[in-house]
Amino acid sequence: MATHPEVKTAEDFRKQPAEYQEAVKKILVSHAINELYGAQVFDEPAIKFAPTPYAKWLTCRVAMEEYHHHVRFRGLADDVGVPGERMDTRNKKPLSIFEFPMKSWEEFCVIKLLADLAEILQVEDLLHCSYIPLRNVARTTMPEEKFHAQFGRDFCSELIKTPEGKVKVQDAIDRYFPYLPAFFGAAHSKNNEMFRKYGLKQRKNEEMRADYLARVKDLLDSLGLRMPKIPAAA
Amino acid sequence: MTADDPQRWFSTLGEPLGEAERADIDAYLAGLGIGPSLPTLLVESWTQAGSLTRSPAGSWWDIEEAERTRLEKLANLDPSDPEWLTTTDALHGAAALAAVRAGVADPGLVRAAAGAAAYATYQFRLTRAAKASPDHPFMRKYALFCGGRWPLGVYGERFAIF
């Protein structure tokens, strides 16, 4: 539960301790950057891999929504004085999940299935955030994130109807999944401790990762797919 | 001609085609080098549109993409421009409204329609930024969207429009 009083506006934000302000800024920058990278390296390029006009246009809309998520988080960051350079993907090394070299429709569907589920957990953790403008953006963003994960599930379900499709989807899972546990950050993270101290986040990184792994296991079991072994360090 | 009246988008789906719309279709196809002699398939329902567009994309898509790539060498647009994203949201709203009016509750199909509209708007803006001819096929396709249609592409030697 939040241990810090609710902060309702950007004006109130400026009256908070410097550490609180920096914690909020770090979360905003992280989300703004991740949403932009996702749209740039996965969603927009995936339009060319989509096999039908329906899938291409749907992917186009999903890309637009991901760009819009970036704009929403960037807007909050602008309001609290984060310099634009901190949210420029050219100035910041991407998280490892964005380094996956996507080359097929099957891979994109797996990315939506697994990475958007990871994003849902991150956004869920902000739904009770003490900084109300961030909480509100999380609530606005959540239905679209859920649709994106459902998009992955629906198309993967379609693909695995044939034996060849199932092999390709499983292969994509085997190669992409290892990137994902690190998305939740290091165990015993100082940043995460600060986020929880101020009621910005609710759970430890390791708790979120464990929850994610359990949800992925259930999801893949329900599709008749296999969860790869997790690297020991994760 | 802009998407500044998104309420008009998707408002004439399934209705008989007028002469001006037929002229836009002919000019669009001729501009892509597909030929204006293709028969037109007037799609009459969201279900039919959904089913048809789930067929594999034909060569018309590749021709459009080749032209988009060519234009992007002449002009550059920011896909995260907030004003542009607001427009795409409005187009999504128009698609959702049209679907609800037709008794359709398929969020995937609504998003596909919204994506088609957004893509056509992007192609229109790109064409304009590249200072291409007003008769450019992307301009003619955009005019069809502005008139309330959803051009679906070429399927089995027929140009389909909803």
Image (cartoon, coloured by chain):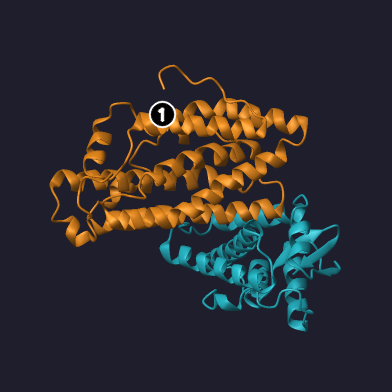
The residue sitting at 65% across, 52% down in the picture is A56
Q: Colour of chain A?
A: orange
Q: Quadrant of the C terminus of chain A?
A: top left
Residue underneath mark 1: A182
Which residue is at 58% across, 58% downward? B71
Viewer-closest of B37 and B21:
B21
Residue furthest to the top in view is A232
Residue A51 shows in the view: yes
- Whether residue A49 appears in this view of the structure is no
Q: Quadrant where the N terminus of chain A lies?
A: top left
**Residue B84, position as x, y percentages in the image:** 47, 65
The answer to which quarter of the image holds residue B109 is: bottom right
Query: Residue visible at 39% across and 56% down?
Result: A71
Nearest to the observer: residue B76 or residue A84 = A84
Q: Label 1: chain?
A: A
Mark 1: which amino acid? Ala
Coordinates of residue A214 in the picture (x, y in percent): 50, 30
Residue at 68%, 57% (x, y): give it: B64
Q: Which chain is cyan?
A: B
Quick one: which residue is furthest to the front in this view?
Answer: A1
The quadrant in which residue B17 appears is bottom right
Q: Nearer the viewer, residue B114 or B72?
A: B114
Residue A218 drawn above or below residue B7: above
The reply, left or right, for residue A106 in relation to residue A182 is right
Q: How far across and how far down the image is residue A46, in percent?
A: 59, 45
Up-down: is A97 above or below B31? Answer: above
Q: Secondary structure at mark 1?
A: helix
Where is A181 relative to B37, above or below?
above
